[in-house]
Image (spheres, rainbow, N blue to C red):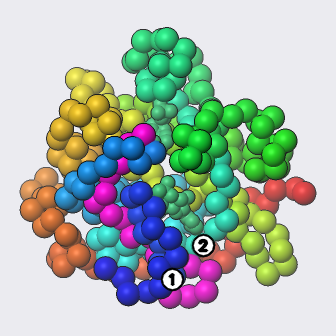
């Protein structure tokens, strides 16, 4: 566990002050919640798996030119990221009907959508993350038009790329939630970058052949086997060797694989929205 100053403790992660100004350490906990904290459990090994899966995905996204907060991996549970001003809008992008979309509109789960569907939710546990429209976002100044356009454009690109990446691992990307943040440079320019995490906590992932759920719905729906499902995702993506078992090394902090992987931080990141 990091000894740096605590900035914030959330439901699944803790943020500590980073080593350099403008950086933050994201610590992935084993705490698991659903319904915005209504249901809680501690699932050993989950934090390690999410840290590694998210780190793997953010590296791949950086490789194709998507600007993210990710700087470098620190250890099995921690990564160094750029501190951003989080935009209080959760961008959900869906390829197949499931979850709240099915519930809200009374549509069966598992129907392929003709084109990916982008939705917005207000990031507020107190209000239970209500669905909002682009008009709400602009009216209440949660983001300006150009930022909204950028978030939508990046969400579609991330979705296209990740749907292909997961399919190569025999996993269908059903839907996911993305968070974005503002990065300011010395001149006060604002850049929009992808923040938070992308993991089986924030995506719906189904086995492409059997339809088996490999994501947090296993916890939300009391199905059990969450940690094994996350481990399966990590193995299929090639993050864990087929004989490696994060769940035996419950904490993971002292693992052999706990090596620092260096990545050159970008000084300027993201696309600059026109003001
Ligand atoms: P929650 O706040 O919903 O309980 P978490 O436990 O995942 O969620 O806490 C992580 C928090 O850190 C989230 O609120 C997320 O918006 C925020 N966050 C993610 N990335 C960054 C970043 N680069 N800079 C600042 N805040 C971030
Ligand atoms: N999500 C939304 N809020 C928090 C998270 N993790 C993710 C879910 C799912 C997608 O957003 O994990 O992948 C859509 O969720 P829902 O509940 O709106 O169907
Ligand atoms: N409501 C969200 C979910 O079910 C967030 C949470 O409670 O952790 O994933």
Which residue in the structure is indicated by mark 1?
18
Q: Is residue 18 left or right of residue 225?
A: right
Residue at far right of view: 275
Query: Does the residue at mark 2 contact the one at mark 1 (Cβ under 8 Å)?
Result: yes
Residue 75 vs residue 227, the one in the foreground:
227
Residue 103 drawn at (x, y percent): 47, 19
Q: Does 1 appear above or below 206? A: below
Q: Residues within 10 Å of mark 1 (few under 14, many from 20)?
A: many
Looking at the image, is 35 positioned above or below residue 272?
Answer: above
Left or right: 222 as drawn, with respect to 38: left
Q: Looking at the image, which is closer to me, 264 or 147?
A: 147
**Is the CB atom of the residue marked by disc 2 within 8 angstroms of ligand 1's nearest atom?**
yes
Residue 168 seen by the camera: no
Q: Circle 2 is placed at which residue position?
A: 83
Q: Quarter-wise, where is residue 190 in the image?
A: bottom right
Tell me where residue 14 appears, x and y as whole percent: 43, 69
Whether residue 258 can be seen here: yes
State the SS at label 2: loop
Location of residue 247 in the rendering, given as x and y in whole percent from the top left corner: 14, 58
Q: Nearer the viewer, residue 171 or 164?
A: 171
- 165 falls in the magenta region: no
Front in this rendered view, residue 73 or 103: 103
Q: What are the residue bounds of the magenta stretch?
A: 18-35
């Amino acid at each position: 566990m990091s000894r740096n100053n605590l900035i914030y403790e959330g439901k699944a992660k803790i943020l500590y002050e980073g080593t350099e100004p403008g950086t933050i350490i994201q610590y992935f906990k084993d705490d698991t919640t659903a319904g915005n904290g209504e249901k809680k459990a501690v699932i050993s090994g989950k934090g390690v798996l999410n840290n590694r899966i998210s780190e793997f995905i953010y590296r791949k996204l950086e490789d194709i030119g998507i600007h993210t907060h990710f700087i470098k991996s620190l250890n099995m549970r921690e990564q160094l990221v750029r501190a951003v001003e989080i935009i209080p809008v959760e961008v959900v992008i869906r390829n197949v009907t499931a979850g709240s979309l099915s519930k809200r509109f009374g549509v069966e789960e598992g129907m392929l959508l003709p084109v990916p569907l982008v939705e917005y939710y207000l990031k507020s546990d107190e209000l239970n993350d209500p669905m909002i429209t682009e008009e709400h976002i602009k009216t209440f100044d949660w983001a300006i038009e150009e930022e909204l356009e950028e978030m939508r454009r990046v969400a579609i690109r991330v979705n296209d790329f990740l749907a292909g990446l997961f399919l190569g691992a025999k996993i269908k990307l059903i839907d996911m939630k993305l968070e974005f943040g503002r990065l300011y440079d010395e001149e006060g320019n604002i850049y929009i970058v992808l923040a938070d995490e992308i993991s089986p906590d924030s995506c719906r992932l189904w086995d492409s052949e059997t339809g088996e759920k490999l994501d947090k719905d296993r916890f939300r729906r009391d199905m059990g086997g969450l940690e094994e499902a996350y481990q399966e995702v990590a193995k299929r993506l090639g993050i864990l060797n087929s004989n490696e078992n994060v769940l035996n090394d419950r904490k993971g902090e002292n693992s052999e694989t706990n090596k620092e992987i260096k990545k050159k931080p970008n000084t300027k990141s993201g696309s600059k929205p026109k003001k």
